[in-house]
Image (tube, helix red, strand yellow):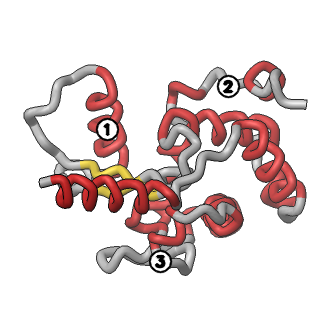
């Protein structure tokens, strides 16, 4: 029994060893740097860089709690209570679903990006050109690149973008109502 318990504790410790939390201020800085390097057309699309960064970091805080290894399995389980985190999960699923078509979803990594259409989880298209497991490692440069790729596709290609409905849903997921009042100066007041 002790050997089994030690084995379970050892496996748990090993799986958590790869987990990393980024800080709000660090993520803000990295996003600002990358956004400042975007083409002008994207920067002038109506959502200011500061507003976008505040809303996106707020979404990260609410979605993954700044954990790079977060994976959230969402399903249309009718037995869930209608309040608290389960309600958020159901709202997220409704946002990602197509009308009457009820499908489950998996959200990956720091930005809690859905496998469909963002990355390859063997069941979905691959807009970001990456395996979903790369969204759950400690290297967040590719995660940020993926988010900015999604935004660029929407802005540059508009309704002509391949998978535009799915891309729009991902953008709406990142701009959820709980972060609508995330104003840059207030939200990042502790960052220097």
Q: Which class describes the residues within 10 Å of circle 3: few (<14), some (14-19), or many (20+)?
A: some
Q: Which residue is mark 3?
A: 131
User: Residue 97 appears at what percent x and percent y?
Assistant: 29, 51
Q: Identify the residue at image location x=35%, y=32%.
A: 88
Residue 191 position (above or below residue 152): above
Q: Secondary structure at mark 3?
A: loop
110 left or right of 100 in image: right
Q: Which class describes the residues within 10 Å of circle 1: few (<14), some (14-19), or many (20+)?
A: many
From the viewer's perspective, is the residue at label 3 or at label 1 nearer? 3
Between the residue at mark 2 and the residue at mark 3, the CA separation in whole angstroms equals: 31 Å
Q: Which residue is mark 2?
A: 182
Q: Identify the residue at image location x=17%, y=25%.
A: 81
Residue 117 position (above or below residue 27): below
The foreground one among 136 and 3 is: 3
Decide which of tag 1 and tag 2 comes sooner along the chain: 1
Q: Identify the residue at image location x=58%, y=28%.
A: 179
Between the residue at mark 1 and the residue at mark 2, the CA separation in whole angstroms equals: 21 Å
Q: Secondary structure at mark 2?
A: loop
User: Residue 161 appears at what percent x and percent y?
Assistant: 55, 71
Instruction: Work out whether residue 152 can be spotted.
Output: no
180 left or right of 163 in image: right
The foreground one among 2 and 155 is: 2
User: Residue 44 appears at what percent x and percent y?
Assistant: 83, 50
Q: Which mark is residue 89?
A: 1
């Amino acid at each position: 029994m002790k050997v089994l318990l030690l084995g379970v504790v050892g496996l748990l410790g090993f799986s958590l060893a790869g987990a990393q939390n980024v800080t709000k201020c660090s993520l803000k800085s990295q996003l600002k740097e990358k956004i400042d390097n975007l083409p002008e057309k994207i920067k002038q699309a109506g959502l200011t860089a500061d507003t976008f960064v505040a809303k996106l970091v707020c979404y990260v805080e609410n979605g993954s709690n700044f954990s790079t290894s977060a994976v959230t399995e969402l399903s249309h389980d009718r037995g869930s209570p209608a309040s608290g985190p389960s309600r958020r999960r159901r709202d997220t699923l409704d946002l990602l679903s197509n009308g009457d078509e009820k499908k489950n979803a998996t959200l990956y990594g720091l930005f809690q990006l859905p496998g469909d259409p963002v990355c390859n989880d063997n069941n979905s298209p691959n807009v970001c050109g990456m395996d979903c497991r790369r969204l759950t490692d400690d290297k967040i440069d590719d995660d940020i690149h993926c988010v900015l790729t999604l935004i660029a596709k929407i802005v540059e290609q508009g309704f002509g973008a391949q998978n535009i409905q799915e891309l729009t849903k991902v953008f709406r997921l990142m701009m959820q109502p709980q972060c609508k009042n995330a104003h840059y100066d207030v939200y990042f007041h502790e960052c220097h």
